[in-house]
Image (cartoon, grey):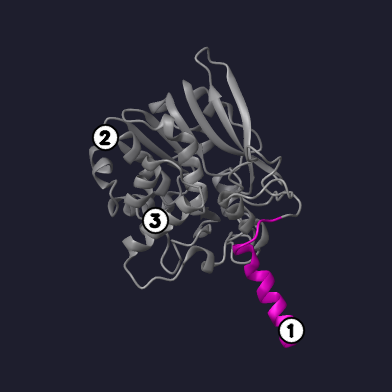
Amino acid sequence: MSKRRAVLLLRERFRSCFLAHRGDRPTSIHRLQAASPHCSSVATSSSSCRASPHQEFLAMEARNVDGGNHPNGKTDRLAIPSICLHGLWSSGASDKNKAMVEQLQRYGVIKSTKVAEVMETIDRGLFVPPGGSPYFDSPMAIGYNATISAPHMHAACLELLEDHLQPGMRALDVGSGTGYLTACFALMVGPGGRAVGVEHIPELVASSTENIKKSAAAPQLNDGSLSIHIADGREGWPELAPYDCIHVGAAAPQIPEALIEQLKPGGRMVIPVGTIFQELKVVDKNLDDGVSIRDETSVRYVPLTSKDAQLHSN
């Protein structure tokens, strides 16, 4: 490869750290916001519409196609180069976790003080398999054809659900995986509430329980206000319904009726829906049991399916 070609490739590789994307609307990434107050699309800008730092953060995802981990070679987010996330530290894990949260705040992904506090308290490093890079803004394989989502997606979902994660409320995490988001839910609802994780892979339930035991949510695992159960997430966990909020960490072809039924009137569910093309949908149940649904952003998640289909997925 010629020197000129190498320079051009490097320039293209890292220019996304500094420039807003001006191409077509991306559909295969976790975009956090469908539109800004002044733009028709985050991924499309004009001379009269200047990109915000948040938009530039999203643009980074659209431009960089290297490094997103997915069990089948796919990605539920196109990873940001480590240079953009200051991914190399010489300090301890807690400082790295704090730096990750501060970076998400800097780009406007985290706006809530409460969400920032919870994500700082629950160290993501305790929930990523050994050898991974837990503080990089990238999804990672956790075995069994499953992933832990990128930090920015966890932050986005916590922001969307914050009003329904108040002390004393009940939260259901479908496809709880490593237990990270379930632990965050537990801190937000407190010991007077209930945080329930549902996962159909027994080995993940066992490992997630061990992860939580090492975290700041361990006391709630001990007192029973946080629990992880082996079950088909499409059926929810009716024993403790209704829930003020439900989070689904895998994409369903359509919204499971059982989850709508288990959502409390006034509650909210966040769920990715679709197959090839997916949208993160926000489902609000009205006090009269009516349901309103809106699209938040285009995403790419692993499918919400049966245990057998997941384990034998190619």
For badge 3, the amino acid type reads Arg
Main SS of the magenta segment? Answer: helix
Give whichever of discs 1 and 2 has the lower sequence position: 1
Q: Nearer the viewer, residue 34 or 219?
A: 34
Residue ID for mark 1: 4
The magenta stretch is 1-21
Q: Is residue 265 left or right of residue 212?
A: right
Residue ID for mark 2: 191
Magenta stretch encompasses residue 10: yes
Q: Within 10 Å of the Cα at label 2, are there few (<14), some (14-19), or many (20+) other Cα atoms?
A: many
Element under disc 1? helix
Give whichever of discs 1 and 3 has the lower sequence position: 1
Q: Nearer the viewer, residue 129 or 155?
A: 155
Residue ID for mark 3: 124
Establish if 240 lies above or below 276. above
- Residue 28, labelled with which disc? none
Q: Residue at x 59, y 63 (%)?
A: 17
**Residue depth check, mark 1 versus mark 2: number of the one nearer the observer:** 1
Element under disc 3? helix
The N terminus lies in quadrant: bottom right
Asked which quadrant contains residue 74, the reply is: bottom right
Q: Residue at x 28, y 49 (%)?
A: 216
Q: Which residue is drawn at 70% across and 82% down?
A: 6
For badge 1, the amino acid type reads Arg
Rendering coords of residue 160 (x, y %): 50, 36
